[in-house]
Every structure is written in C-alpha cells, then in structure tokens.
Amino acid sequence: MKSSKFLLSVALVLCMALTACGNSNNNEGTKEAEKKPETAQQQGQKEDENQVVEVSTVSQSDQYLKFDEGESFEKNAVYDAYEKDVGVKITNKWIAADDPQFKEKLKMTIASNDLPDFVKVNATQLKELTEADMIMDITDVYDKNATDETKKFLMMDGGMQIKTATFDGKLMGIPASYNPYQYQYLFVRTDWLKKLNLPEPKTMADLLTIAEAFKTKDPGGSGKAYGIAVSKNPFSIDTGVTGLRAFLNGYHAYENLWMEDGNGGLMNSDIQPQVKDALKALQDMFKKGLIDPEFTVKDADKESELIYNNNIGLVFGASWTPAQLAKGAVVNGKVVQEWGVYPIPSVDANPTLNQIGIGVDDYYVINKNAKHPEGVIRLLNQYIVTQQHPTEEQKVYEYGKDLIEKGANYWLLNPLRVSRQLDNNGEILPKAIETKDTSILETKDQKTRYERAMKYVDGSDMNMWWEYLISGPKGAVSYNPQIQQNKEYLQDKFYGAPTSTMAERKELLTKKRDEVYFKIIMNQVSVDEFDKFVGEWKKLGGDDITKEVNEWYKASK
C-alpha cells in the first residue's frame, strides 16, 4: 500500500488530468502554457518523489525475534515492505546483541560522531546531541512530510510529548510515544479469599488483614507462606510486577515524582512524610513475616516462583501482570489458581492516586547530515498506518511474509515505533467481551485482545485466561474509565531533560534512598532513619536539583 502522501499526489494528478479533459474549450494561450516543457527543477522534484531513498539506523537484536529462513537484519520481509510501500530502503550500520551492548555501542557512536541517519536515544542524549549540533532541527521536514494522521496521532496528549522534544522552538526528535495512563493494580487469589471467608480488599487495612491471613493460614498448603510478593527493585518503574510503587501510592506517597509543593513550585516525592508512613507499614509486615526475607536478592521472575508455587497470593502489578500469573494459574490447559484484580486500596478516605509519567523516555533523532530526512518521516507515517487501520497485506509488518502469528515477533523489526498516547480499551473491551458485540471494537489492539479473551470464554484455549483478566468484565482495564474520569492519578510535573546536578547526582541519591528504605523495611534501623535521610538527600544534591527543576518549571510555564 502506498503512503498517504503518495496517494495524495496520485489523486492530485488525476484531478488535474480530469480538469484538463473537462476544459477542452480553454483558449490557445492556456493550451500553449500546458505544452511548455518542464524545467530541470520540476523534473528533479518528480524524480525525488518517485525514487527509493536509503536511510541508515542501528538496531538491537532480541531473544524473542526469530527470523524466517533466509532472512536477517540485512534483508527481511518488514524492510522489503517499507521499500515497496513507501520507497524507503533501510540499512543498519551495526547490530547489538542485547540492550546493554546497544547502550554501550550507542555511547561510542555518539562520542565518535558516527551517527546513522536516524537513531533512538534517551532524553539526556537528545539534549546533548542538540547542544552539540549533531542532529537536525526537524521542524520543517516533519511539518512538510508528516501526514495529518501522524500529526494527530502524536498530539493525542495535547502536545506534551512533542513539547519534551522541542528546544527553543525547534523540534529535535520524534517522541517514542506510549500511553502514560498505565496504572498499577492489586491482584489477589480469590479462591483463597473464598476459602478463608475474607472480603475483597477495599482499604489498606483490608489488604493487611488478607496478607496476614494468607501467611498464617497458608491456604495454598505450601508450608512456607508469605503475605505479599516483593522483588529486589521494588521502587523501579521497570518493575511492572512484584513492586511497591503501588503500595506507596496507597499511602499517598510516590517514587521519585516531581509534584506541586502548594507554593507554585515543585518538590520531590522521595522525601515527603507520607513515604515514612508507608515504610512503617512495610516494616510491620516484614516483622510479621509477610514479606519474603530474601526479596533483596530476587528479581521479579525469581520472586514470582513463590506465586506459582502457592506461597503467595497478593501482588501489585501493571495491567499485563496476568500474563505472568498465568505461568502458575494455568497448567495443562486447566485453570488451577483463581485471581481477581482490584484498584489500589487507600489508607484513608481519600482515593489512591496512581503514579504515572509523561509517556516518553526515548526519542528518534535524525543526523544533521542525513541526505533523506523525509525518508524517516515516511517510515513514521507508514508505521502509524499499520497500527491504526492495517490491511490484510500489511500484516507483514507484524508477522512477516506469512502474514500469520507464529511467535516470531517480526514487529520488532520496525525501526521506528510509536504507540497511542491514549486508549479507550477500558470502555470498549469489557463491554465487547461481555456482550460479544464486535461492532464496537475500534483499534487493531482491541480486536486482537477481544479474539484472545473470547478463546478463553468459549473454552477453545484456556491459556488465554490471562487476557480475560486484563480485558474482560472486572479485568484490570475495566477500572481505567473511573480512574480517568475522577482523575485518580498523579502525573510527574517534570518532563525536561535531566538537569546538570540530576545527571551527576541522581544515581547516588537513588542508591542512598534504596539503602535507607530497605534497612527500614527489613527492621535493621528505626523508621526515624527516614528523617536523617531527608537531610542527607538535600545535602547530597537534592536541594540543588530542586532549585534547577523549579527554574525549568518557571521557564516552561
């Protein structure tokens, strides 16, 4: 399928042709003007529009990417489709084996000023490349080549993500956008609740009661039960399951979030008194044996083994958590663990505010010396088309040449990927699944999720249990409309590139924070140690960072 721009060009040419045929009575002067030969510039423009342009990038391999026979990063069905459909030939300057290697090679590539035509970078690198005058101001090339659909797609959030890539009025990158309204939930073994005649959790007090009952009464018969699953990086945004950010939120505390201070400025959440309350509650849980004492050395996968083996029946996680729970919940095509999902309970009468970010961490930047920056925008346009309203033929961009799902993860070959900044899955999917009404499904994602969930509903594939717990009635996303409508979320107010002190001191401050938090949770020090940490945080650079963040905040208003 041709790009929108190409189709528009074709339409204009046809319209001009029809107009010329319809006006056969035009005067001779007009006819003579039409017969004038094209200038060299006009001929060159036509050739440029029709020729295949080549753009280079760099890529990261993935353990889940499986090439069809005879294909590789050098030549594959996805790259061929881009060349055929939008006239852009993709090449790679290098391929990294994994994420750590990619990051290291990218640093070397930047340091040696050997950038490909386009590449994905983080916010710090975006700022550094802009200041070093190594990347292109793409304001004009984006405005001229991005389709109306693309521009609308990247402005769903009102322009916040685009703003993060704009310096002094110049658009310096394309946000690798995603939906920031991704929430955390509480997942509970409902078969255990029934067995112990416990109510569903509505408050933090309920959660603590359930956790203690799961520990002391061991409804899973494991012989070694705990109350809640926690892993070694519980406060990291990357810990989508077995984390404690949601627990903090239940106490109106937040992890490394810049929030309004009530005086027109911003303050960091890590040093607010509500955190101390949450840490005290966690310390009490640890004392009672409700938390795995080895959590500091277990990653999410290792800690999840306790969930699979019936040692734990409570866990906080993202909407996709059921996909991980399924490893223990569905055995040999039979559901052996029953789970329910609930909003994060609150410690008091005030609703919990789910902590969220801006929805962009990385950016696609274009080399200042790229010969065909318009080719990158063509890739962007086409990717959005394949996500929004793909044809049968365009399944190649997701599945490869066979156009069917076979677990090869060919979608990873798309060199430039952006996601919707907003979705209405919570409104559409539960209703569609409950009523079996496919007419209300709008996006490719909704149709895919509906098909998976219905396989569980009709009993044809019980392994799709996890999708039903995500998308079905009372599934995770079913709570999103209420969260959205009532604004039961707190979004980070700082979306600029890391400040100078932040870049220098953030790692140290995070390490110090986690050290103190862990010691408090594990009852190695008094909870009052938190107050000492606040003072140290300020002296170790926190006050300087706060000053810099507020200078940015004032300037960005």
Image: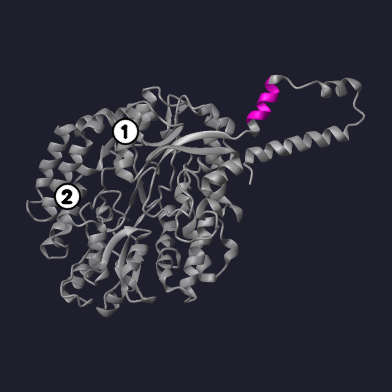
Q: Which residues are magenta?
A: 41-48
Disc marking residue 468: none
Vertical placement of residue 250 versus 133, above or below: below
Q: Residue at x 22, y 31 (%)?
A: 504
Decide if residue 521 is on the left or right side of residue 326: left
Q: Residue at x 23, y 76 (%)?
A: 220
> Where residue 3 sits in the image (x, y, percent)?
62, 41
Vertical placement of residue 367 versus 354, above or below: above
Q: Name which of mark 1 and mark 2 comes first in the sequence.
A: 1
Vertical placement of residue 160 versus 519, above or below: above
Closer to us: mark 1 or mark 2? 1
What secondary structure is marked by label 2?
A: helix
Residue placed most toward the observer, 474 or 310:
310
The chief SS type of the magenta part is: helix
Report the residue marked by disc 1.
107
The residue type indicated by label 2 comes to Lys
Vertical placement of residue 47 versus 339, above or below: above
Report the residue marked by disc 2.
276
Query: Is residue 554 visible in the rendered structure shown here?
Result: no
> Where residue 223 sits in the image (x, y, percent)?
16, 75
